[in-house]
Structures are given as C-alpha cells and as structure tokens.
Amino acid sequence: MRFVHNTLPQRVRFASGAAAAGVRAEVERLGARRVMVIAADAERALAEEIAADLPVALRHDEVLMHVPVEVAERARAAAAAHRADVIVSVGGGSTTGLAKAVALTTGLPIVAVPTTYAGSEATDVWGLTENAVKTTGRDPRVLPVAIVYDPSLTLTLPAEMSVASGLNALAHCVDSLWAPQADPINAALAIEGVRALTIGLPEVARDPSGLDGREHALYGAYLAAVAFASAGSGLHHKICHVLGGKYDLPHAQTHAVVLPHVLAFNAPNAPDADRRLAGAFGADTALAGLQALRARLDAPKALRDYGLAEADLPDAVEAILRSVPEGNPTHATGDNLAALIRAAWEGSEPA
Ligand code: NAD
C-alpha cells in the first residue's frame, strides 16, 4: 500500500435541534463580533432562528445557483461595507457557494449550516460562473472553519429534492472510488457514506418528516463530501460539470440521472469498487444495488426531463471527451461516451 492523503482541517458539529447553540459557540470561539448571515429568501425563517442571538452586522439573501460573478461581487462589497468578520451561511450548495466566493477574496472564516445533501461545506472547492462558463478551483480560504449539521433543518426539504440531493451525495461516494486521488482512506469514507445513505434515503422518501432517515442521510452526505474533497473529480463529476455548466441543468437532478450510467460504464473494469459498493448496498453487484435503491426512491431518470435538448448531445459528448480524467477504469471514446450520454438523456437502462 502506498499513498499520500490530505485531510482538510475543519470542525464538525452534528446534533438535531442544536443549530443555533452550535453556531453561537463557533462564532464565540472565533471571537467574531460582526456576523454576515447568508441565506436565500426560502431559508430566511431557518436563518432567523439560528441567528437570533448572534451579533449580526448584515443579512444577505441574493443567492443564485452556480454563483454568477456579479452576485459574488455584490456580496463581497456588502461584507466590506459592513465590516463583517465572519460569515454564517444557512442553506444548500448554492448558499455555501456564495459564502465561499466571499471568503475567496476576503479571507473571512465561514461557519456553514447546510440544509441539503450537496456537501459543499466539507470541500475546499469554489465555483463561479461568468458568461455561462463555470470555473472551479481549490483554495484553503474557502473551506468553512466549522460545519454545524442539524438534521432537523432538512425536514422542510421536499421529498423530491431530498432524493435528488441524496443521490448527488451518493455520486460523491461512487465517483471517489476511481477519481484521480482515490486512496484507501477516502474509499473507506465513501463506502461508509454509501451505507449511511442507503439506510437514510429510503426512510426520507417514505417519511420526509422523520428525523431518523434525515440523520443517516446528512451523516452520509458529510462522509461523501469528505471522500470527494480528497479523491477529486472522477468521470461522473466531469460529465455533470460539463452538462450543468454548458446547459444550465439543475445540479442535484443531473447527478441523480447520470450516476447509474457512469457506474455501468466503469464497474466492469473496476472490480474492487464494484465488490465494495455491492457490499455497502447489500446487493450482488454495485449496479443492481444502485438500481434497487433508485427504484425505491423513484429517482430522476432522464436528462431530457430537465431541459437538455437532443440537438445538444453531440457537443456535450465532445466537451466531455476533452475532460475525461486520466486513469478512468474504462477507456472513454467518442462512441462509448455518446452511448452513455444518450442513455442518460433518454432515461433508458444503463448498459
Ligand atoms: P441549492 O442550494 O440550489 O438548493 C436547491 C433548492 O432547495 C433551493 O430552492 C433552496 O432554496 C431549497 N432548499 C435548500 N434547503 C432547504 C430546506 N431545508 N428546506 C426547503 N428548501 C430548501 O441546491 P444544492 O443541490 O444544495 O446545491 C447545488 C449547488 O452546490 C451547485 O451550484 C453545485 O455546483 C454546488 N456544489 C458545490 C460543491 C463544492 O464542493 N464546491 C459540492 C456540491 C455542490
């Protein structure tokens, strides 16, 4: 065994119903006195409760998916004008993403309170969109200093969005097994993430207001994100990055649709990943396990349902072909990628 593994420095609190107390403790620990609260309009009520006892200098609610540069600029200017000394973000990946954009140029610490399973809070990856092109990068300044997980905050996330977001987390786990920096440590986290998500997500789908399923799902989403942050982007993430950036497809649903097709594509040439995933799903093969889980969740099936036009497929394949990671288990060609993308577009059985 030979590997070099990076562990990102970050404090993680996890307790249902304890978000306000957890955030207060983290803000005090930082000695901060001027809090910038970032939360979208939809999460305003959650954020109000969490921030009730904080020294709030400003509230910022202009949150957009994929963080347009001008939105980031306005948030940075607001942080400077109010002399903020810490950011508390309450919301999904888009909200965490805006907090990261502010931290990238200001160096302000982030206390992240996630309300979906996107996992951005546990990575040092930032993303910004300019002229319909999404750029991502890594920077230690954007890694939240603390995450405050409170599964009770996810009770309001609609079942459909919960399923899509949970499968986005599952995709972090699966793709980590063959991503460029895959190693035994991130694989261990990924496999435990699959186990937790396989327990949690069917519970969430059955009873979105039950806490037990929410706890397992959020715990799994965290493990998934840590695995992904360490292993990097594999073929699945490269495909979703191209599709999301070029055609403005919804993030979580795109991941949910594409995952079984990438698994079917890679598993035959990644027997160890296949065996370990099968074990975590409790199935004979990884694909059978994923498909059984997706059936229970009534998971998103076809990219055409989310706005991808058939005429865009050839261009998409060309762009994806240019970004295939070196060392992907199955050799990607224009032909086999075209078949993969068409199957994901149609929603046909992954082959
Ligand atoms: P999102 O943050 O856009 O949220 C989706 C929808 O759910 C929004 O309408 C939001 O208001 C709503 N919502 C969120 N929490 C809720 C709750 N508890 N109750 C009710 N509604 C709620 O979507 P997302 O999938 O969480 O994040 C997607 C974004 O995150 C993308 O831009 C993606 O690129 C980014 N992302 C980044 C990383 C990273 O490492 N940098 C990782 C994963 C995702």
Image: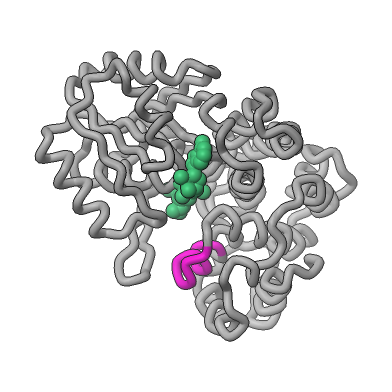
The image shows residue 287 at horizontal and vertical percentages of 80, 54
Please state which of residues 31 and 2 is positioned toward the viewer in this rendering.
31
Magenta stretch, main secondary structure, is: helix
Measuring 42% from the left and 29% from the top, which residue is drawn there? Answer: 46
| 88 in relation to 336, above or below | above
> Would you say residue 119 is visible in this rendering?
no
Q: Is residue 3 magenta?
A: no
Which image quadrant: the C terminus? bottom right
The image shows residue 249 at horizontal and vertical percentages of 52, 65
Q: Quadrant of residue 350?
A: bottom right
Measuring 65% from the left and 24% from the top, which residue is drawn there? Answer: 211
Q: Is 333 on the left or on the right of 35, as rendered?
A: right
The image shows residue 272 at horizontal and vertical percentages of 76, 48
Q: Quadrant of residue 56?
A: top left
Measuring 46% from the left and 23% from the top, which residue is drawn there? Answer: 12
| 316 in relation to 53, above or below | below
Q: Where are the magenta residues, as a range?
A: 240-249
| 115 in relation to 324, above or below | above
